[in-house]
């Protein structure tokens, strides 16, 4: 059985089987673990309204950077599909397709696209340094807001105004996002360094 070697591009490839059924089994296990991680991090929240501050962004970007574009996107899509089917994997106990029609719907969709981008950048070595991770995570956050903010505007701008949308859709989250970004930016390069890969 061939094992992954140090030339692998993302952490998911650096450990365990690198081909055949062993690799497939590893990938299935990683998707399952990633979904559990995303669900658990979704439950850590500061109850802002209409969109809570959660650890979902942190989990999304870490999973993407560790797994790469394809496996990361598969994990995020599996998590979103579970939530859409009614499993309580998002913040709070609400789930189902109607959850996507609420204020967090745009952000949830943005997670999948941000994950694909961050995973793609990780495959190009961005997850191996703090500076690279900061860049990847900043771009990932931009993507998340690019989907979340227009949906918030659609739901609330006519009644509340765009200043309100910007405050409750972006500004309230900037400090928390900076803390999550800093944690994720240090975490993956540290794992790479400790692993010797």
Image (cartoon, helix red, strand yellow):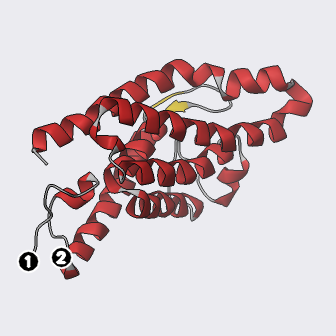
Residue 43 appears in the picture as rendered: no
Residue 176 location (% of width, % of height): 49, 22
Where is residue 53 drawn, in percent x and y? 53, 29
**Which mark identifies residue 153?**
none
The residue that mark 2 highlights is: 22
> Above or below — where is 8 with respect to 17?
above
**From what the image shows, is residue 72 above or below residue 94?**
below
* Label 2: few (<14), some (14–19) or many (≥20) C-alpha neighbours in 10 Å: some
Q: Secondary structure at mark 2?
A: helix
Residue 140's place in the image compared with 63, above or below, is above
Q: Label 1: few (<14), some or many (≥20) within 10 Å?
A: few
State the residue position of label 1.
1
Q: In the image, residue 146 lies at what x, y percent?
A: 67, 40
Task: Report the residue at 73% width, 24% height from top.
Answer: 166
Percent coordinates x, y for residue 149 in the rendering: 71, 36
Q: Are marks 1 and 2 in contact (CB under 8 Å)?
A: yes
Asked if residue 115 shows in the view, the reply is yes
Q: Quadrant of residue 167?
A: top right
Inter-mark Cα distance, 1 to 2? 8 Å
Q: Residue at x 11, y 38 (%)?
A: 194
Which dot, 1 or 2, sits closer to the camera? 1
Q: Earlier in the sequence, mark 1 or mark 2?
A: 1
Left or right: residue 22 versus residue 27 is left
Q: Nearer the viewer, residue 40 or 122?
A: 122
Q: Quadrant of the N terminus?
A: bottom left
Q: Nearer the viewer, residue 32 or 134?
A: 134
Q: Residue at x 27, y 34 (%)?
A: 187
In-front residue for pair 99/160: 160
Which residue is at a point 19% across and 57% down the rendered structure image?
7
Question: Quick one: SS at disc 1?
Answer: loop
As drawn, the residue found furthest toward the right would be 158
């Amino acid at each position: 059985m061939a094992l992954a070697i140090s030339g692998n591009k993302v952490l998911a490839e650096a450990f365990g089987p690198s081909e055949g059924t062993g690799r497939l089994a590893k990938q299935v296990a990683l998707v399952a673990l990633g979904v559990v991680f995303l669900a658990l991090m979704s439950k850590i929240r500061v109850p802002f309204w209409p969109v809570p501050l959660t650890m979902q962004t942190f989990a999304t970007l870490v999973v993407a950077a560790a797994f790469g574009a394809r496996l990361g996107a598969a994990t995020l899509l599996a998590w979103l599909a579970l939530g859409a089917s009614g499993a309580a994997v998002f913040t709070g106990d609400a789930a189902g397709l109607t959850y996507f029609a609420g204020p967090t719907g745009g952000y949830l969709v943005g997670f999948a696209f941000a994950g694909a981008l961050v995973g793609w950048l990780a495959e190009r070595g961005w997850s191996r340094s703090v500076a690279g991770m900061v860049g990847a995570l900043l771009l990932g956050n931009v993507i998340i807001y690019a989907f979340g903010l227009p949906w918030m505007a659609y739901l609330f701008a006519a009644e509340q105004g765009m200043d309100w949308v910007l405050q409750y859709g972006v500004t309230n989250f900037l400090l928390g996002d900076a803390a999550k970004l800093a944690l994720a930016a240090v975490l993956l390069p540290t794992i790479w360094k400790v692993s010797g890969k």
